[in-house]
Image (cartoon, rainbow, N blue to C red):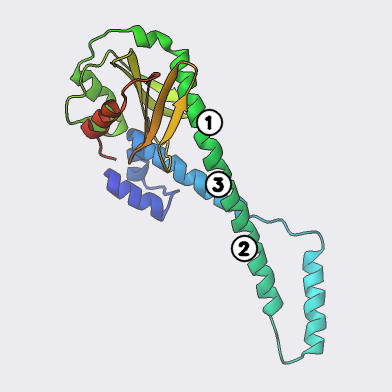
Amino acid sequence: MNCIEFRHQLLTDPRCNVDDFHQHRDTCAACDRESMQVLQLEDKLLKSFSVTPPDGLKARIILAQTLNDEKNRGKFQPQWLAAAAMMVLVIGLTGWFGLQWTNQQGGISNLQTAVLNHITDELNHLHEDNNVQTADISNLLAPFGARLEGNPGQVNYLGRCNIRKQSGIHLVVPGYKGSVTVLLMPGEFINAAVDVNSSRFSGRIIPTDYGSIAVVGEHGEMLDNISDNFIRNIHWTS
C-alpha cells in the first residue's frame, strides 16, 4: 500500500483493520501523523455531538406526545421533535467550531513560543560548524517522506528534534549577521505566515504543503532567501 492508497482508505475508514493499512502506517512517519490527526478530529466530532439529555426528558417527551395525540388524533405533527433535533445539532456544531477556532488561535501563539524556546534551549547549535553533507540531509529527510532535490547551501548543523508534540528537523545555516536556525515542522499547519520575535531573535513561521517552516536569526537578518531556498529544494512526497 502506498501513501495515496493509505490516505484514501484513511478518509474512508480511519479505524481500518487491514494488515497493509497498519503496516504502511507503522513504516511511514508522514502517514502516521496524518492518521493521528484524522483520529483526533473524529474523536472531537464524536464528543461534540455527544449530548447528555436531562433527567426525565424521555418521560416528558412521551407524556407530551401522548397529550398531543389525544388532542390531534389522526393528525400527527412531529414539527416540534424536528425542531428539538435541529437545536441539538446546532448546539453541537457551534461548540465544535468554537473549539476549533480557540485551538487555532491558541495553537499559533503556542507554536511561536515553542519555536523561540527551542532555539533558546539549543543555542549551542548556533556555534557549530559541522560542514553537513547533502547526503546526510537526504538521509534525515527520508523517514519523513521527503527528499532533497537541490543544493541547500552551507549547513553547519543538522539534527532531528521535537517541536511541541511533532517530530521535525533542526538545521543551522550561516547568515549575514550570524547563524540562522531553520526548523522543518511537518504536521504543524497554519493558515498564514506569522512573525516570531524575542529580545535577540526575529523571524517567520511560513505555511507549507506538509506543515510549516520556521526561519529565525538575529534582528535585521536577511531571511527570505534562506526560507525560499529550503522550500524550493526540499520535496515532500507524502
Q: Which mark is residue 101?
A: 3
Q: In the image, residue 195 lies at what x, y percent? A: 44, 31
Q: Residue at x 51, y 49 (%)?
A: 42
For this rendering, which residue is in front, 13 or 179? 179
How far apart marks 1 and 3 lie (CA) works out to 14 Å
Residue 61 is situated, as x and y percent measured from the top left of the image, at 77, 72
First of labels 3, 2 by sequence position: 2
The amino acid beneath tag 3 is: Trp
Q: Which quadrant of the figure has residue 209?
A: top left
Relative height, residue 221 to residue 104 (above, below): above
Circle on res. 110: 1
- Which mark is in front, 2 or 1? 1
Q: Badge 2 is on which residue?
A: 89
Name which residue type carries label 2.
Answer: Leu
- For marks 3 and 2, give the one nearer the viewer: 3
Closest to the observer, 163 or 219: 219
Q: Who comes first in sequence, dot 1 or dot 3? A: 3
State the SS at label 2: helix
The mark nearer the N terminus, 2 or 1, is: 2
C-alpha separation, residue under disc 2 versus residue under disc 1: 31 Å
> Residue 187 sits in which quadrant?
top left
